Image: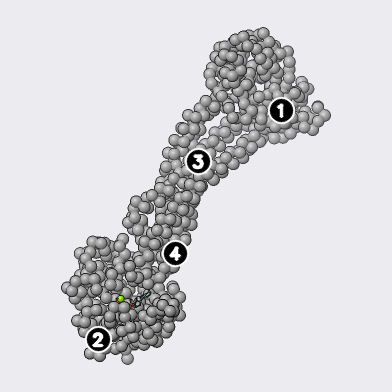
Amino acid sequence: MLKDHVKLAVKNLRHRMSRSLLTLLGIAIGIMAIISLMALGEGMQQAVTGELSSLSDVIIVSTGGDIMSSFGGGGGGSTSEYFTERDIADIERIQGVKDVSTQLSGSALAEYNGKATIVALTGMDIEVMRLQYASQSLHAGAFLNDGDQNKIMIGYGIAHDTFDADIPVGGRIKFNGEKFFVTGIFGKQGMGGVSSDSIVLMSTRDFKALTGQNNMSMVYLRVFNVNDAESIALNIEEAINENHGRKDFATATTMTSILETVQTILTLVQLVLIAIASIALVVASIGIMNTMMTSVMERTREIGIMKAIGATNKDIMSIFIIEGMLVSTIGGIFGIIMGVFGSQALSLILSSFFSSMSGTQLVPIITLMSVVLAVAVSLIVGVLSSLYPAWKAARMSPIEAVRYE
Amino acid sequence: MIKDVIVTQNISKTYGKPPLQVYALRETNLRIKQGDYIAIIGPSGSGKSTLMNLLGCLDKPTDGNILIEDMDVSTLNENKLAQIRREKIGFIFQKYNLIPTLNALENVELAMGFAGVDTKTRTERAKQLLEMVDLTKRITHKPSEMSGGEQQRVAIARALANNPSIILADEPTGNVDSKSGDNIMRILEDVNKKGETIIVVTHNMAIAQRAKRILRIQDGEVREEHA
Ligand SMILES: Nc1ncnc2c1ncn2[C@@H]1O[C@H](COP(=O)(O)OP(=O)(O)OP(=O)(O)O)[C@@H](O)[C@H]1O
Ligand SMILES: [Mg+2]
């Protein structure tokens, strides 16, 4: 019997082909929106996760507050509290710590093309620098190399907005009278929280030679075993806090915890994207309902005939619900296909917009989960939006078959 | 003893509410026996279709009871009524009333589909019936691709599909020319000769004369016409 209902529904949809196609298109667009936004969200998620988990053996220790504001942006310099040599020694003594490196913060008078201004300086081991800034795109030039001397990397803002003239790669800046050469300029960060636009990076050695200071604002360390990272981080906090006689002097953050935070944020972003896409679906389901209502009204006589020759209310209900489900499921499948292409197009557009900001390309990832979800959602939309029209149809009387026109 | 297929007990049908009430049918008592061939005649608006719709369980009487094969249908729910309509009754309409999206074969099969007959049996029987009404060459035609007479013959095949106890035909020849009309009536008479009970509404006295019984309706009152 179900087979007959499907057959009837198909015949009827084909009979009103252009209308069916338009209704179907509505659903397809809604599903496409969901699929492509989910694919972009997933792509984002995996890109970030991949990047961060390659650093999973790293622990970052900072003074006071929140690590998230300094990580990646690397602003440094803003803290007025610094680690001591004793802190570093304590960290190195903790079991499982592989190597330790520090980030130094300070400031200097910078002079370029006749204009002078105070800028914040960050000194760190070049190897650590490469790790920490790996995710950041270069606007021009190249990264520093081990052993480089009197060479610096600068943020986009230093290069373009700080002095009267733009600083090119190879440009020469004087810090406290000493000459440094620019090897690389980071891409514009813009809205990314604390930005690296106004950063000046140099090697630890250069920093010490230039400023004579040893203000350790951050400590980077790696552990032998990733699984120990959390416990080692706790040990470090304890040891340093004891040194300073305060409970909240140091914060040791593992990549795993950063990863979790980032993932939570990204999941939220994804949910918001899906919510937006759902509006398209709601509109589409109203479209189905509208088409079905029209169809029920037009087919009053036909419904009456079917009842007159013995169709039950259930038969009629079933025919109309199947019709709605067919439209929405076929629409959904088209939507998935369109979403596969749509997400590629979207990522191309997005990439061309943000290419200057982030080195990593956003590759949309279509998961089985999102496809299953799309199919399920379109089925549900089909049933829900045809429920009322189908009920209306089922309630019609067989006398409609003989009603005068 | 021949059993009664349909018995009506004091059935009335009114449309609308007072004071605009229309008495379409007044306290009618009928006894229709197995194998009967009844013609219903009467002027337009006299209540012929009203009576047919009640007998066919398309509508319910305002008063009185209808027994179909001794079952009181006024007490049945919608599901049971649908079952009666598909198992006991074959309705033939003046306007054919085929489903426009289905071809001749599918239209005949549909009634059996609702009755749960399996696909193979269904197709076989539908083909037989269409052959009987001489439409073997039209089985894949849609209603819009057939003449009125042809459509009505498909409708007859459909009405017979589930072996009903009774065939109700409300002006089956009303929309076709006299030659097609004769053809249709001959088919119905053949069916009657095989034992099927048939009730036909007609305006055509020649057709009515060929029936075994004639009922005349006037202003909702049914009288037996004696030949
Ligand atoms: N749904 C309805 N609502 C109100 N009045 C109705 C309705 N159906 C029929 N009537 C009225 O009931 C009366 C009987 O109608 P019916 O259709 O039974 O006549 P009929 O004998 O079949 O006429 P015809 O030969 O023209 O088909 C008529 O006066 C008609 O106007
Ligand atoms: Mg009539």
Residue B188 found in image quarter: bottom left
Q: Residues within 10 Å of mark 2 (few under 14, many from 20)?
A: few
Task: Report the side of A397 relative to A151 (left or right).
Answer: left
Q: Residues within 10 Å of mark 1 (few under 14, many from 20)?
A: many
Tell me the residue that label 2 is attached to.
B212
Marks 4 and 3: which is nearer the front? 4
Q: Nearer the viewer, residue A88 or A159?
A: A159
**Which type of secondary structure does the marked residue at label 3 adopt?**
helix
Residue B46: horizontal and vertical position, in percent?
31, 80
Q: Amino acid at mark 3?
A: Leu
**Which type of secondary structure does the marked residue at label 1 adopt?**
strand
Q: Nearer the viewer, residue A376 or A310?
A: A310
Which quadrant of the figure contains the N terminus of chain A?
Answer: bottom left
Tell me the residue that label 3 is attached to.
A37
Residue A307: horizontal and vertical position, in percent?
38, 70
Residue A361: horizontal and vertical position, in percent?
50, 30
Residue A221: horizontal and vertical position, in percent?
68, 26
Q: Amino acid at mark 4?
A: Lys
Do discs 2 and 3 belong to a common subunit? no
Disc 3 Cβ-to-ligand 1 distance below 8 Å: no
Q: Amino acid at mark 2?
A: Lys
**Which type of secondary structure does the marked residue at label 4 adopt?**
helix
Q: Is residue B51 visible?
A: yes
**Which type of secondary structure does the marked residue at label 2 adopt?**
loop
- For marks 1 and 2, give the CA distance: 108 Å
